[in-house]
Amino acid sequence: MRLIRFGEAGKERPGLMRGEAIVDLRRHFPEMPDIGSRFFQEGWLEKIRSVSDEGREMDTRTGPPVACPSKIVCLGINYDDHSEETGFQAPKEPLLFSKAPSALNGPTDPIVLPAGSGQVDWEVELAVVIGRQAKRIRRSEALQVVAGYTVMNDVSGREAQFSGSQWYRGKSFDTFAPMGPVLVTPDEIGSVGSLRLRSWVNGTLMQDGSTKDMIFDVAAIIESVSEDITLMPGDVIATGTPSGVGAFREPPVALHAGDTVECRIDGIGSIVNPVVGPTP
């Protein structure tokens, strides 16, 4: 299945994407909660498998495919080629940081440049959405707690991240976690061990990698994170980015107002976000 949330920001409705058509799930289940913690806890992922509605085409905004995660856990330096371009040694265990859930953004919504930090960068990433509470999950069982997969752009304010040594701030500016366009369930996507990830800025290819080059795969990441951090239904884990980000190019490249960033993962789809200047 390919789950979406559609409608005005803050008023999204849960749905299914079937081709170019959208199934409004609340037409079938008026009591259905938004796609988030309650949705997964109450077993809605299984209940909606019976829906045969083919949907209809709608001219509507699509929001991030999960609402209000309790946390967005991210990995740094999780691709061999990204380790090489940054000059950082490959970590011996997953290197974790976080983004504020308030950074969550839709797959076509604007990335708003912050007023207080420059050198804004892009990072295409495979994001994992957790479907049930998980603590100390063994690697062999880790994929059983996955609700689905989506695309995330780990937008990064490098000036704050590096010059000010404020990773949380630089990663958490409003709009800095565009996600979508859909949440693809594991049964539909199959193995995530060799998915192609790409990003473009203004149509120029910047990143072209594969999840087969991840230092820690999805199961290993879940095992590591859940060792001492309880993962909750609806939580998001962003699994790192391949080489080709702007900060480590020669000369460095940063995003500017008027740019457009596309991040794509085969089997899931693309998120395409315009870049706009700071809000007055």
Image (spheres, rainbow, N blue to C red):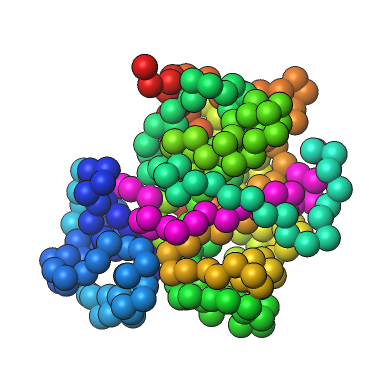
Q: How many marks?
A: 0
Query: In the image, residue 65 lies at what x, y percent?
Result: 37, 56
Q: Position of residue 26 (x, y in %)?
A: 17, 65
Task: Please say whether residue 252 is one of the residues in the magenta stretch.
Answer: no
Q: Residues in magenta?
A: 62-85
> Would you say 86 lies left or right of 133 here?
right
Q: Quadrant of the N terminus?
A: bottom left
Residue at 52% over, 54% down:
72
In this rendering, the answer to whether 262 lies above or below 50 is: above
Image: 276 above or below 180: above
Q: Is residue 76 left or right of residue 36?
A: right
Q: Is residue 96 left or right of residue 116?
A: right
Occupied quadrant, residue 23? bottom left
* Residue pictured at 47% horizontal, 62% vertical: 235
For image coordinates 72% across by 42% down, the residue present is 243
Give the position of the C terminus as an image quadrant: top left
Name the image quarter holding residue 50.
bottom left
Residue 122: in sight, yes or no? Answer: no
Front residue of 39/242: it is 39
- Residue 91, position in %: x, y? 81, 55
Q: Residue furthest top?
A: 280
Residue 162 picture location, percent across and down: 71, 31
Q: Is residue 235 left or right of residue 74?
A: left
